[in-house]
Amino acid sequence: MNITTDEFLSLAKKYQALGSSTQRLLEDVRKGSFKVQDGVRLRQLYEFLLDLQFVQGDLSEVHEMTAAVGRMLAEHQDEEEEKIVGERWVPEKGFPGATLWLQREDEKWTIAPSPKEGACLGKCVKDIGSAKWFDKPLPLLVDGH
């Protein structure tokens, strides 16, 4: 790994700023024995690994760790904070009309709590109340999407 002194010092400062709990998490991820941690530490670690990946070139261990932490972060992201990014009116077999489905950032879907078109785009999931989220609109669709 060939990096400049300035890059090294910048990385060293960022590593020091992570704090001991995040540094322990980094060691645990490296050894493969990590436990689920809170999202703040995961995000700090992920950002540090992205910086490290930027200066280290093609070292596959760092790429693998960055990918692993990215997956952990995605899995443990607070679903309540997800934003509603899509809406779709879905016709159902055997029923007149259609149901409004909402899609959040991770592409999961739920039925809108009120059938007002455009009422939820950009809102947080927590703002629309508790709902069950599905990988895709239920297989009642006429068009089969």
Image (tube, grey):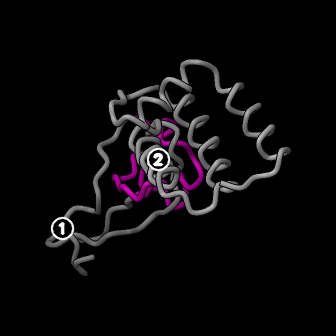
Q: Which is more toward the observer, 128 or 23?
A: 23
Quadrant occupied by the N terminus: bottom right
- Please give the name of the residue rendered at 67% of the width and 56% of the height, measured from the top-left corner: 54
Specify the farthest residue to the right. 6
In the image, the segment drawn in magenta is: 102-129
- Please give the name of the residue rendered at 63% of the width and 20% of the height, measured from the top-left corner: 19
Please tell me whether mark 1 sits on a helix, a strand or a loop. Answer: loop
- Please give the name of the residue rendered at 29% of the width and 62% of the height, measured from the top-left corner: 136
Q: Which is more toward the observer, 145 or 43?
A: 43
Mark 2 in CB contact with mark 1 (< 8 angstroms): no
The image shows residue 6 at horizontal and vertical percentages of 85, 44
- Please give the name of the residue rendered at 31% of the width and 48% of the height, measured from the top-left corner: 133
Give the residue at mark 2: 65
Crowd around label 2: few <14 · some 14–19 · many ≥20 (10 Å): many
**In this rendering, would 42 be left or right of 140?**
right
Inspect the image, locate mark 2, and give the three-letter code of the amino acid beneath it. Met
The image shows residue 62 at horizontal and vertical percentages of 52, 50
Specify the farthest residue to the left. 94
Q: Can residue 51 be found in the magenta stretch? A: no
Q: Is the magenta stretch mostly helix, strand or loop?
A: loop
